């Protein structure tokens, strides 16, 4: 299960200046272009399947017996809290120094000490013991920040600050081309 715990304030994947540069549109069309930028940005997020702007998430995940946790929103920017239970009451909270981001773009995080993760699937005995398929329960509750910094804006969602743009240029170009198509029917 995943839920958004801190939303992004800006979700547009390009700005008016970039669109006007490509379209050569008059400044009187700015209100229309701003609407089209919003539409094109939502279109890109729908295509990708999740929000692209930096947001805070809370997600329950399984370890599947290995040393890694796989989070569903990427790229991971920061891990803020990790619990060894899907409910915080009675759970052990691990320090952020116990967790490291192995691959931010793939959503892989691991524990500094691999002994902290345990196998959480039941063993069943038949002729020999085995782990039933899909028997792993989601034991870990992770709060984290993931997404792209858009257009070099500042983000302090979850305590991190960045002024550098991380949004891939090809995503912004796709949004600009979608605005161009919506604006003039060409693109």
Image (cartoon, rainbow, N blue to C red):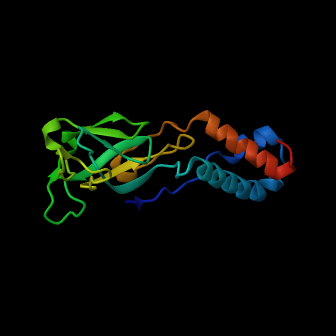
Name which residue lies at 44% across and 40% down. 75
Name which residue lies at 63% across and 55% down. 42
From the image, which quarter does the N terminus lie in?
A: bottom left
Residue sitting at the far right: 185
Give the answer, above or below, for where 182 lies relative to 77.
below
Going by the image, does 80 lie left or right of 12?
left
Name which residue lies at 75% across and 48% down. 179
x then y, percent, for residue 130? 21, 46
Going by the image, does 166 lie left or right of 68?
right
Residue sitting at the far bottom: 89
Going by the image, does 129 lie left or right of 132?
left
Q: Of 15 and 6, which appears nearest the observer?
A: 6
Q: Of 97 and 123, which appears nearest the observer?
A: 123
x then y, percent, for residue 88? 20, 63
x then y, percent, for residue 144? 34, 50
Q: Of 62 and 26, which appears nearest the observer?
A: 62
Residue sitting at the far front: 127
x then y, percent, for residue 60? 31, 56
Numbered circles on residues, count: 0
| Quadrant of residue 69 within the rendered picture | top left
From the image, which quarter does the C terminus lie in?
A: top right
Q: Of 16 and 73, which appears nearest the observer?
A: 73
Name which residue lies at 53% across and 40% down. 152
């Amino acid at each position: 299960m995943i839920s958004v715990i801190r939303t992004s304030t800006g979700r547009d994947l390009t700005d008016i200046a970039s669109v006007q540069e490509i379209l050569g549109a008059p400044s009187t069309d700015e209100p229309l272009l701003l609407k089209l930028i919003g539409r094109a940005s939502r279109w890109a997020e729908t295509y990708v399947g999740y929000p692209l702007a930096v947001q805070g998430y809370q997600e329950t995940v399984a370890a599947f017996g290995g040393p890694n946790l796989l989070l569903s929103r990427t790229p991971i920017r920061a891990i803020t809290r990790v619990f060894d239970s899907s409910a915080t009451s009675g759970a052990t909270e691990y320090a952020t120094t116990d967790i490291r981001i192995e691959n931010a773009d793939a959503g892989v995080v691991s524990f500094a000490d691999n002994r902290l993760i345990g196998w959480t699937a039941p063993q069943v005995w038949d002729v020999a013991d085995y782990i039933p398929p899909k028997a792993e329960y989601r034991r870990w509750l992770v709060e984290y920040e993931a997404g792209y910094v858009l257009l070099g804006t500042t983000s302090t969602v979850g305590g991190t600050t960045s002024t550098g743009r991380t949004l891939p240029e090809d995503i912004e170009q796709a949004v600009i081309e979608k605005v161009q198509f919506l604006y003039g029917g060409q693109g």
